[in-house]
Image (cartoon, rainbow, N blue to C red):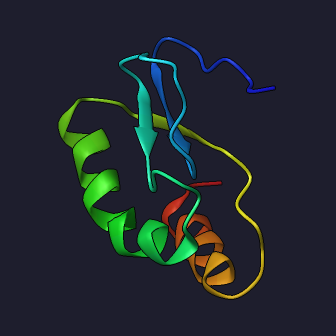
Amino acid sequence: MLKKPKKDEAYLLIKKRKSKLKNYYYLSKMKNIDEAAKNLYSTLRKIKNDGFKKIAVEKIPNKGLGKTINDRLKRASKY
């Protein structure tokens, strides 16, 4: 079950869902990690352009390209 994001944050998802919330952003339609990696930066730019300052991220498998995606997200985050 998905955690419901706060109104002021975007929710970055690895797989497309039936939900039509405006703050849901999808990296892939079918949880394809190659497609997710390809779409990462364009999706992050879209989130920024839509005015979101915070992003919640669905757990991404930490293997193969998933490691790379997680690394990029970690580097982009502020602690």
Residue at image position (48%, 35%) is 54
- Viewer-closest of 52 and 43: 43
Left or right: where does residue 37 sit relative to residue 2?
left
Q: Is residue 54 above or below residue 18?
A: below
Q: Residue furthest left?
A: 49
Q: In this view, does 73 lie above or below 26?
A: below
Quarter of the figure with the N terminus: top right
Residue 60 x/y as whole percent: 70, 61
Which residue is at a point 41% across and 39% down the rendered structure image?
25
Q: In which quarter of the image is the C terminus?
A: bottom right
**Residue 58, how many percent across, how many down?**
67, 45
Residue placed at 57% from the left, 52% from the top? 14
Question: Observer-nearest residue: 44 or 24?
Answer: 24
* Vertical relation: 12 (above or below) 24: below
Q: In this view, does 31 lie to the left or right of 42?
A: right
Q: Residue 7 placed where, x, y %?
A: 49, 11
- Up the image or down, 72 lies above or below 16; here it is below
Please report the residue visible at 65 percent of the width from the left and 76 percent of the height from the top. 66
Total numbered circles = 0
Quarter holding residue 73: bottom right
* Residue sitting at the far bottom: 64
